[in-house]
Amino acid sequence: MLENINSPSDLKKIDEKNLLILCQEIRDYIEKVVKQNGGHLASNLGAVELIVAQHRIFDSPTDRIIFDVGHQSYTHKILTGRYESFSTIRKFKGLSGFPKSSESIHDAFNTGHSSTSISAALGMATARDLNQENYHIIANIGDGALSGGMALEALNHIGATNKRIIIVLNDNEMSISEPVGAIAKQLTKISSGSLYRNLKYKLTQKLIVTTIGRFTRRVLSRLKGIIKYMFSSKGLFFEHFGLTYLGPYDGHDIIGLEEGFKIAKNIEGPTLVHVITTKGKGNYFAEDDPEKYHGVSPIGNSKKKSFTSIFGEYLVELAKNNSKITAITAAMCTGTGLELFREQINERFFDVSIAEQHGLTFAAGQAISGYHPVISIYSTFMQRGVDQVIHDICMQNLPVTMILDRAGLVGEDGETHHGVFDISLFGSIPNLIFMEPKNGTELKQMMKFATKHKGPTMIRFPKAATLDEEENYDFDENIIGDFQLENVDNVDNSEVSKKYAIIGLGTEFALAKEIVNKLKKNGYDFDLFNPRFITPISAKTLINLEKYEKIFTLENHVILGGFGSLLKARLQKPEVHIYGLPNIFIEHGSIKELRKEVGFTFENVYKQIEGVLSE
Ligand SMILES: Cc1ncc(C[n+]2csc(CCOP(=O)(O)OP(=O)(O)O)c2C)c(N)n1
């Protein structure tokens, strides 16, 4: 059936009795493609019926369907003319893993980061009303995403505007990990309420799917919505925000969902349709362990040690020897490698839910009270926390260690997830010591130093496998801001002696080394630096760097506003040539493909440097 659906209007023609089969086809297809390409398995399997029902009741693209985070939009993509191209999802030049308006008119709003959908929907609704138009705006949001600050700010605003929008709460009682907080508890109370359970029992268990059965279910479903709306106190939580509460509905019962959406369509003002789904629905493993199957990598991925796991393991070691160290995550326990900490030092582990800003100021609160929090956030999500870093942590010079995981290009998750702006955002903040290690050993040294330091520190590292067994040296307060000079033969040389210098930040040190080896072979006189520090840069280092004629920098970050730019602004004499990523939103694909696409490869950088040298 699926290959004949080219748009939601084809879906509307499908007979009710075939919908179960259709959903199975969708699930099979999603599983097959995710196995090959990687992607968000459990979230998508849980949202199949929910999205089918929406596309049958609403009229996309006239009606605007928004997906919060957007990681659960695979069914939507398949049903909106992208059945064939879905097999290219997350691949270079293929479909994006998230909604993208440049990909389809049905993708009403681009997402990737959490908790934006209600704000966007409300903005669209005010524009619609100013234009005196009449379409529906639907914001699909998960229970995890609902805990994010922006979603709550938007709910608060809704109360003041009373705009007609439909929020569909996809409640699977899971964020990536178990959801945290009062809202999650409130939702659990609603969904486990006896009225809901009774109705669900009546509606889905007892009735056989016959014509009469379907008719009765329709009536009961409609009644259910009305009963809940009129008599239930369970939705009061949302009603206090000025929303009309409908549900909870069984998110795998298409007929019931369709009835719910029909009711919602006719309600003036903002409505919340509460839908209970099973994350990973239909896949035994994903249902059983939705945390593990939230996102999966394609089969055959290498199991080398990542910076993330070195960080996670070493933090446990440090915290076992220092009872003041705490670990904080914003709903990304597994992604940031903190499971071991959660398991072994649970009393000092804090998951603040999808709340990066809160997490940072929460860390500041712990730090001002004598603790040393280590908060790990993906670079891209840290974009949310700029003011908290500046105003709450750095201005008060508090001992917080901030880890920026997934810094640089991240690959298949694409433009919403690359961590390529953090140096621009955090590279010039007073009091902050901002570092990037060249390998796993250096990461450990930086972590040891950072957790002893009496002020704020930040360490960025990429999604990459790394070595954990190279040379060791003292990394302490005495070397803050000093770039480390290495010559290619690895003989320690503290004198600046050459005409040219090449500086490779973090993992780009390896690329710099490769390039300098070839340049030396071709007769050029070079020094090679591992900077270690993005900010501050010591006076000693700056004085040394002034002696070079030309300096070449390499970084896994955008060029303008990055490490090289900041360095260039501080040097008078040397010409500084900066290599890194262009200041554009870079698409998705493997890191290798993306680097090739933007010209950040050994061959290209070497060629450019040689060009500069032969000028
Ligand atoms: C600002 C931000 N922080 C973290 C994430 C990572 N993230 C992606 S999905 C997700 C959990 C979302 O849970 P929920 O909304 O309940 O959706 P589900 O996957 O359970 O369907 C998280 C934390 C993100 N996308 N954006």
Image: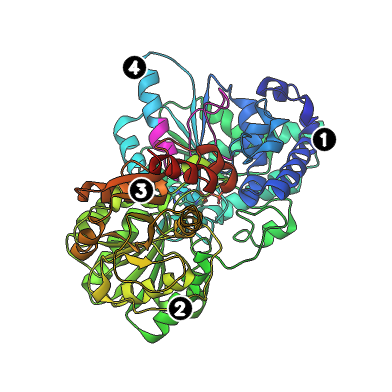
Q: Nearer the viewer, mark 3 or mark 1?
A: 3
Contact, CB < 8 Å: mark 3 with mark 4? no
C-alpha distance separating marks 2 and 1 = 58 Å
Q: Nearer the viewer, mark 2 or mark 4?
A: 2
Which residue type carries mark 2? Val
Label 2 packing within 10 angstroms: few (<14), some (14-19), many (20+): many
On the image, numbered disc 1 is attached to which residue? 210
On the image, numbered disc 2 is attached to which residue? 316
By secondary structure, the bulk of the magenta-drawn segment is best described as: loop
Asked if disc 3 is less than 8 Å from ligand 1, the answer is no
Q: Secondary structure at mark 4?
A: helix
Identify the residue at horizontal 74%, vertical 58% (top origin): 284
| Magenta region includes residue 66 | no
Which residue type carries mark 1? Thr
Segment colored magenta:
97-121
Locate the C terminus and report the quarter of the image it occupies.
top left
Asked if disc 2 is less than 8 Å from ligand 1, the answer is no
Classify residue 145 as left or right of residue 213.
left
Contact, CB < 8 Å: mark 3 with mark 1? no
On the image, numbered disc 3 is attached to which residue? 383
Give the camera-side residue of 442 and 301. Answer: 442
Contact, CB < 8 Å: mark 2 with mark 4? no
Which residue type carries mark 4? Leu
On the image, numbered disc 4 is attached to which residue? 130
Q: Secondary structure at mark 1?
A: loop
Which residue type carries mark 3? Gln
